[in-house]
Amino acid sequence: RELVVSFGEMLIDFVPTVAGVSLAEAPAFLKAPGGAPANVAIAVSRLGGGAAFVGKLGDDEFGRMLAAILRDNGVDDGGVVFDAGARTALAFVTLRADGEREFMFYRNPSADMLLTAAELNVELIKRAAVFHYGSISLIAEPCRSAHLRAMEIAKEAGALLSYDPNLREALWPSREEARTKILSIWDQADIVKVSEVELEFLTGINSVEDDVVMKLWRPTMKLLLVTLGDQGCKYYARDFRGAVPSFKVQQVDTTGAGDAFVGALLRKIVQDPSSLQDQKKLEEAIKFANACGAITTTKKGAIPSLPTETEVLQLIAKA
Ligand code: ATP
């Protein structure tokens, strides 16, 4: 049982053809399939692992295109449903000259927000060794209830739960609601991954010192990770903690690095769940995940830059 089932949104990012411009200044946009949970599923599959995606797409050309991308990448799309009345979600994303990412979403509501609990592929979710999700699917009903139900089904069936909140402030009615709802399911996850920005958002403290990270630790957790970009990541398990540096690469576009990291880590954990209790094995798994994240920054876009296992092992061997 090595299946990773990823739940949530899959959408199309429209990315300017030139770098360092605002959305208004962009002369044209390229389609870039994305959505963090979908990226994670494809990351796992690209590494040779079993992966499935659960979510809703619009019954339109973009939705069918995204489902085909899942299948072409070896991801089981048996959990994908189509909404006849709503469009596939779109996001316009730009990396401005000041380095900040600017998002503009078309979700009014988009198909992903309309998944219902009754539409869940229960049999597929029950086969998960790891059930992974973010927080965007928690924002609005009916998807919120579907998300909570899917977590319950997976947990009852014995899956490990993996949570990467992937904060997108612009999608929430307020910062306070984002914080409250993101933390409302904090105690249920076995594995949680946050970025530095999310750590500050959730704790209110701009520091990655252990005492700050530990504010997000729960006794119910098996592993808490803080990713630090080119610095690699810090990890906290029940009986040990530490940091694992990343690899030196020529960074081009960091989109999807976090998802690649998560996909790679989950791939390693389903292959050997004892990694969660064994510091040496866990550090090996995190090293593999760092390498996978690092490679993803060397090419434009998320999905096209996700590496195979061979590519990851090559980077590790070279270092
Ligand atoms: P995302 O932008 O996808 O939300 P994130 O903020 O969740 O990403 P990052 O910390 O940017 O995650 O990256 C995840 C992992 O990828 C890092 O922990 C690191 O291992 C690797 N990584 C990211 N950027 C670089 C880089 N420039 N050089 C080397 N490794 C990197």
Image (cartoon, rainbow, N blue to C red):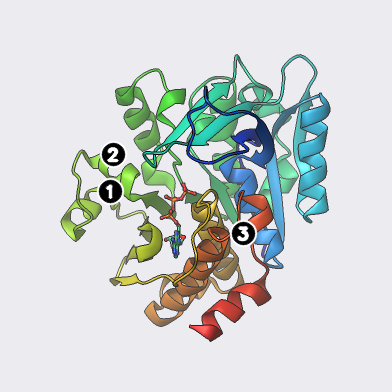
Tell me how far mark 2 sits from mark 1, CA to CA: 8 Å
Quadrant for ligand 1 reads bottom left
Q: Amino acid at mark 1?
A: Leu
Can you tell which of label 2 and label 1 is closer to the viewer? Answer: 2
Question: Which comes sooner in the sequence, label 2 or label 3?
Answer: 3
Q: Which type of secondary structure does the marked residue at label 3 adopt?
A: loop
Amino acid type of the residue that numbered disc 3 sits on in the rendered structure:
Ala
Q: Which residue is mark 1?
A: 216
Q: Which mark is residue 129?
A: 3
- Residue 161 visible here: no
Q: CB of residue at label 1: within 8 Å of ligand 1?
A: no
Name which of mark 1 and mark 3 comes first in the sequence: 3
Residue 58 locus on image (x, y percent): 75, 24
Do labels 2 and 1 touch, CB within 8 Å? Answer: yes
Q: Please say if 166 is above or below 45.
A: above
Under mark 2, the amino acid is Leu
